[in-house]
Amino acid sequence: MTRSPQAKRLLKWASLVIIAITAIYFFDAVGKYFESIPAIRWDARAWLAMAATILCMFVNLIFGGLMWMALLKDQGVHLAPTTAFRIVGMAQVAKYLPGNVGHLIGQVTLASAAGVPIGVSITTMLISTLWLVATGLSMGGAGLLLFLDTSHILDVPIPDAPVMAVLGVAVAISPWVAVWMLNRLLPGLSRRLGSGQLVALPRFHTAVAVAGGFILCFFVFGLMLKLQATYLFGVESGDILTFTLMFTSAWIAGYLLPGAPGGLGVREALVVALLGSVVGTGTAIGLSVTMRLATVLGDGLAFVAGLLLQWLTQAPPLSQPSDNQP
């Protein structure tokens, strides 16, 4: 047996162990703090807040389509905004399949049907994923350092704000450097991905726009948490910045763990662990459930919108009555 299958098997089992540990932690917390979970008063404000958070998730997917379209443009592929959103929106629901990669496969398949070369589609998705992970890690790491007392655990001084800002920018632009290194060190692979040409370096303003777009998306998540905490559970503690950075840590952990569909279980456990000190453990448990509900419904709304766009773009034109008809 080669080392590669062994490594894959080890990664699979490690992921299953982590998923099991987070699930045990989450359900143990539910059992201990069930009585302290605030009841949701489903008045008009609560329904409006829930609808707003679902719409926020939908808007995040629109941003995702626009960022992918910008990366495609740098590779010489021009895609209409409605087509880019249709592909991203319809593919997202597949992330809830086992393996946590179904949405990537679905996006490549739908993009190929729309005329995007497979190599270019894979390349832009890899670049987008690198920026997503780099941005998420920098924001999540900053949140852990700023809002949690980690100095006694890490036994290292916490960097001051300017140093952290420089580190964050360096991490956020690292995917741009990665593409440059790919072209320099592995030109053959780069040409295969670039359909015969070297993968084009994203333009600087594209890099800034994509990194900024992901930061904006994470802040939308923070806004969603703030709306739900305030209007669903009646909790005023915590601001949008705190919610954003703490949720980013939980989200990126669920995103990176293979085998957790949509980060299911991992994200919820970390939301409870990280936000419990901000809003209380009971409220954090409730927020983990309502945020999951909002994101799933937002993904579903994007899928329906994508289907509708597909139907509208493929539907035959309505026949016009002839002048000879009475």
Image: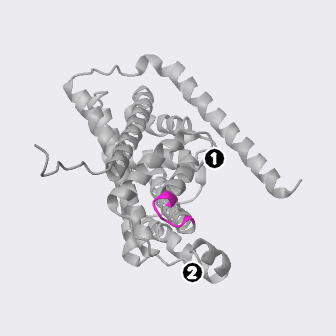
The residue sitting at 16% across, 50% down in the picture is: 322
Query: Alpha-carbon distance for marks 1 and 2?
Result: 31 Å
State whether residue 28 is above or below residue 129. Answer: above
Q: Which residue range is magenta in the image?
A: 112-118
Q: Is residue 115 magenta?
A: yes
State whether residue 183 is above or below residue 66. Answer: below
Instruction: Say whether residue 251 is visible.
Output: yes
The residue sitting at 59% across, 40% down in the picture is: 260
State whether residue 124 is above or below residue 280. Answer: below
The residue sitting at 64% across, 81% down in the picture is: 187
Residue 46 shown left or right of residue 190 in the figure: left
Q: Position of residue 40 (x, y in %)?
A: 32, 22
For mark 1, does the 10 Å Cα neighbourhood hold few (<14), some (14 to 19), or many (20 or more) residues?
many
Residue 197, which numbered label? 2
Q: Position of residue 282 (x, y in %)?
A: 43, 25
| Circle 1: residue type | Pro
Q: Position of residue 21 (x, y in %)?
A: 65, 34
Secondary structure under tag 1 reads loop
Instruction: Please name the residue that numbered disc 1 is placed on.
Output: 258
Tag 1–tag 2 contact (CB < 8 Å)? no
